[in-house]
Amino acid sequence: MGTQERRSREKQELRQRIQEAATELFVMDGYQNVSIRKIADRIEYAPSTIYLYFKDKEELVQSICNDMFAELSEILIAIRQLDLAPNQKMAKCLRAYIEFGLAHPNHYVVTFCTPELQYQHQQPNVDHDQIMSAGLQCFDLLRQGLQEALNADAIRPINVDLTSQTVWAQIHGLTSLLVSMQKFPWQDRELLITDMVDSILRSLAKN
Amino acid sequence: MGTQERRSREKQELRQRIQEAATELFVMDGYQNVSIRKIADRIEYAPSTIYLYFKDKEELVQSICNDMFAELSEILIAIRQLDLAPNQKMAKCLRAYIEFGLAHPNHYVVTFCTPELQYQHQQPNVDHDQIMSAGLQCFDLLRQGLQEALNADAIRPINVDLTSQTVWAQIHGLTSLLVSMQKFPWQDRELLITDMVDSILRSLAKN
DNA sequence: TTGATTTTCTGAACGCTGTCCAGTACATTA
DNA sequence: TAATGTACTGGACAGCGTTCAGAAAATCAA
């Protein structure tokens, strides 16, 4: 009697339909444009139904972003498995991170540019690591790459815990500025990315 | 007959009272917590009165942030006038920028982490340079510092237009991540700032 | 001092938001 | 067929930014 399975499969499917409808709105116009009522209209359900599948709007959007960042993880993992010098892998990862953020600006902003200021009035210790686990996993992959380069003696001696955070901040800085301030008279994006990656590698170089 | 002057002075005063009330709310809890109705309550005027002094909520908050960043400009200008080696001034400016952002997280986020995604659905060419002129002036001061270091032959040859943007992105990255992700297991802030500034100077060093 | 004019301010409304909950409608089981 | 349990909804609540006709107040002219 597969009734149970069918029902839970149907639940799963509706959950996904909600996510997909929300994603369409979100990708176009960002967090502000994802309104529960608009999503409900799109899938032809009542707004309140959405709350049977997601605790609140925040959880819904977080899950959308999490899925996106899982893709970045895969990209980074693929790069790390290439047969290249640690520094080259490093450079490729840094570039991939930035380009990913630029390709998915709204996901990026929600994941890394706003969370705390919104959560600060909620219950004290909501597990933030869980909420944006995929985003943080991407950081950890960068950290591993740095550790690998250090182990291979490809860079100067560093404190990996400290420097990985610095490096993350550096690539995040370019990504978030390009995404947030689209009207600033930026230099060519390719040039900027290259310059940033070069700058980071230069600061890690031996001597 | 100084009636005219008195009246325009009174207008100016009310405008300032609105800004101050808004600032209190804003500093505590950020953009979301600045509601026109709350400000109106605080100064004992009707909500609609505020619209006689500010075009909309965005303009009000921008003016608050602009004032704050004017202070950063002064700090940076003061540093640039110190009698120090260009690299040392540079380091001091970078550090001052980061520390300023950390001291005024909500101002920082509004000025550099959100603007475009909110403005993208408004009239095409609102003069963004004007809107956050003070914030951008701070960038320009950093750029000047870099130019000065280059002129003094204190750093390797660089494209100042390009590298100044890269450097800005680097310090912005640390500032914004620390501000936005307060619950992430960061290394000690002092260490991080020092590491970032060192990293930047190292990447600019000759050889 | 009175009346007309200009400036400042307000109350009520519009349309939107996230969220909750009592109650309906339906599918499954006995 | 009747009882049970799940899925869903309509309507409400409290809040938001913003607008605008009209009230109130201040100024000016006579």
Image (cartoon, coloured by chain):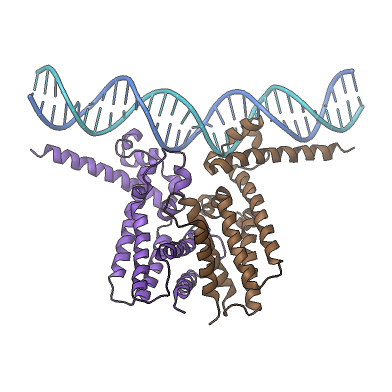
Chain colours: A purple, B brown, C blue, D cyan
One can see residue A41 in this view: yes
Q: Position of residue B24 (x, y in %)?
A: 61, 39
Q: Nearer the viewer, residue A134 or C10?
A: A134
- Relative to A193, is B119 above or below? above
Location of the N terminus of chain B by quadrant is top right
- Taking the spot 57% from the left edge, 69% from the top edge, the residue there is B164
Q: How many marks?
A: 0
- Taking the spot 44% from the left edge, 65% from the top edge, the residue there is A163
- Relative to A145, is A30 above or below? above
One can see residue B123 in this view: no
Q: Position of residue A94 (x, y in %)?
A: 40, 68
Q: Position of residue D10 (x, y in %)?
A: 35, 26
- Taking the spot 58% from the left edge, 39% from the top edge, the residue there is B25
Outermost residue on the bottom side: it is B207
Q: Nearer the viewer, residue A29 or A2?
A: A2
Seen in the image, is B205 located left or right of residue B21? left
Q: Position of residue A168 (x, y in %)?
A: 43, 62
Seen in the image, is D23 located left or right of residue B203? right
